[in-house]
Amino acid sequence: MGESALPRLAGETTSERPWPVRHLNPKIGDYVAKMPALWVEGQVLNLKKWNSLYFLTLRDTDLDMSINVTIPVATLQRALPEGQRVEDGTRLVLHAKPSFHTKRGSLGLQADDARLVGIGELLAQIERLKGVLAAEGLFAPERKRPLPFLPAVIGLVCAQQGEAEHDVVNNARARWPAVRFEIRRVTVQGPQAVPSVSAAVAELDKDPNVDVIVVARGGGSFEDLLPFSNEALVRAVAACRTPLVSAIGHEQDSPLLDLVADLRASTPTDAAKRVVPDVTEERRGLTQARTRIRQSVATILERERILLDALRTRPIMVNPIAMLDQRQLDIDSASDAARRAFGNLLTEQAARLGQLGAQVRALSPAATLDRGYAVVQTAAGAVLRDPAQVSDGEALRLRLARGELAATAGAPGTEY
């Protein structure tokens, strides 16, 4: 197919009428050539010099992304202070224009100016990031998780070569010989430090046997410790569910990892002391505790023995019956008093009852009848007080002291 027969636009291509690579790459190159120049920041990787040009890879400081850059040697050297060199890990700000190499089909940057990111600017960037992360609550004390008292397995992230691993492992095992380690040896300096440490932390966090994680490094310069203030690494540690100890070993400048970690140790050796207890100290503590318990129990027992001795020497304990005898005397005396009082009461009440009986008898109609009187009643039992209450010839009842008589009412003066 001739060039003139090719589709004019990319949207017009089909599987039957595709663009060949030789046709596509120049079009991409033309498109990229229209892009304006820009300022871009990153870390230097794979720096190489060829004639009057430097070839390098500019890597993102947070993510695993990079782009190839060419820059004149003289341009880069002008950006550096006297006596300073560019090496892997150096952070640069470049003014560059995107370019597309049509033969290789690769995108790159052609730089014409450079700025070295100095310590002052790096400190300012860290302070700005510190403020952002603090506002999100990543450094809040309530997020800190307590370390286990006695971890069975410690996850250790350390350099592939260095003293940090030796300091942590040997000091921890000297304090508690049974402790075990899951060690991840990674790059802890330079452009690969952030992804390497982040991946190791994530791997140990997923291990259910790991009780605590220690990220250790034996100090270093400010530039060497920049990865431990990287936002990606700080957020990876914040997302970790396992308690984590930061042991970077740098007293002058505290990296942001110290702030997000659950515990900051001043050195790897200090981390070992903070993570596991000292078996000698624990045994001494147990011995002292047992001694104090024995002394306390002995003191309590002695105090109770003295109290029991004092109780046993009391008269009531020497002769318990004496108390009962006294109570028996009290009961007998009370019983006698109760009998006398009751007898007196009965006598008084009997006399009073006799008096009342005499009064009743004196007032009783029966007493009147005994003196020869009679009570006249009608047949219905009504007592007569007036002759007019009955008729002549009406039957009457005469109640005497010793019985009753029947009678008939008659007119006054009637003789029988």
Image (cartoon, rainbow, N blue to C red):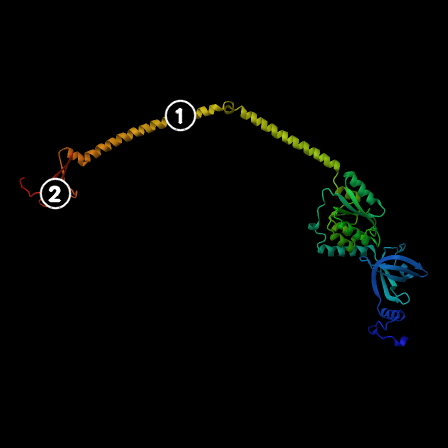
Residue 76 coordinates in the image, percent (x, y): 89, 60
Kind of residue indicated by mark 2: Ala
Residue 78 visible in this rendered orientation of the protein: no
Residue 79: quadrant of the picture: bottom right
Residue 359 coordinates in the image, percent (x, y): 21, 33
Labels 1 & 2 near each other (Cβ < 8 A):
no
Give me the residue at 40% from left, 25% from top: 332
Circle 1 residue: 332
Depth order, front residue of 193/4: 4
Question: Residue 298's mark?
Answer: none
**Element at badge 2?**
strand
Looking at the image, residue 45 lies above or below residue 169:
below
- Label 1 and label 2: CA atoms lie apart by 70 Å
Judge left or right: residue 235 versus residue 33.
left
Kind of residue indicated by mark 1: Asp
| Marks 1 and 2, the one that precedes in the sequence | 1
Question: Residue 395's mark?
Answer: 2
Give me the residue at 39% from left, 25% from top: 333
